[in-house]
Image (tube, helix red, strand yellow):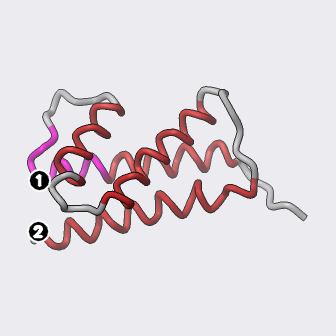
Amino acid sequence: MAPTGDLEGATNRAYYASFHAARAALAHFGELPETVKSHSTVIGLFGKHIVQTGRMDTENGRLLNRAHQLRNLTDYNVGTIDHDRIEVVVIGPEAFVSGIQLILRKKR
């Protein structure tokens, strides 16, 4: 029996967990201008100020981009996610948020 549930909703929430973690990391390091609201700008700033500076490795940094792609796929009805990809939907953002927690602890 296949798992049941709202994969689109899970994808959305997993992405927003990653997005807000990225914003928190940028703010923590003083790299988030108050006027920045767009998702693509936050993702770009995250790459520039967190990944390119070595605060987070490239592989983990890509998890934010992947979560954003999946969220766009489901939120804007340009595709669907099947139950076979649930690990991509949940585990990637979970690893990303854990990575953010690690870099924030290092700065203390």
How much space separates mark 1 and mark 2, taking CA atoms? 9 Å
> Where on the picture, by quarter, is residue 53?
bottom left
* Callout 1–callout 2 Cβ contact below 8 Å: yes
Per the image, the residue denoted by label 1 is 29
The stretch drawn in magenta includes residue 100: no
Q: Residue at x 44, y 66 (%)?
A: 95
The stretch drawn in magenta includes residue 25: yes
Q: Residue at x 25, y 46 (%)?
A: 46
Count every numbered label the image shows and give the total.
Answer: 2
Dot 2 lies on which element? helix
Q: Is most of the magenta stretch helix, strand or loop?
A: helix
Which portion, as a residue range, is magenta?
22-32
In the image, is 103 to the left or to the right of 87? left
Which quadrant, please, contains the C terminus?
Answer: bottom left
Q: Pinpoint residue 12: horizontal percent, then vertical percent.
A: 55, 43
Mark 1 neighbour class, 10 Å CA radius: few under 14, some 14 to 19, many 20 or more: few
Vertical order, 31 against 1 (above or below): above
Q: Pinpoint residue 57: horizontal percent, then vertical percent.
A: 29, 62
Per the image, the residue denoted by label 2 is 107
Of residues 47 and 103, the one nearer the viewer is 47
Q: Residue at x 37, y 60 (%)?
A: 60
Mark 2 neighbour class, 10 Å CA radius: few under 14, some 14 to 19, many 20 or more: few
Q: Amino acid at mark 1?
A: Phe
Q: Pinpoint residue 62: horizontal percent, then vertical percent.
A: 40, 52
Dot 1 lies on which element? loop
Q: Residue at x 38, y 60 (%)?
A: 59
In the image, is 34 to the left or to the right of 94? left
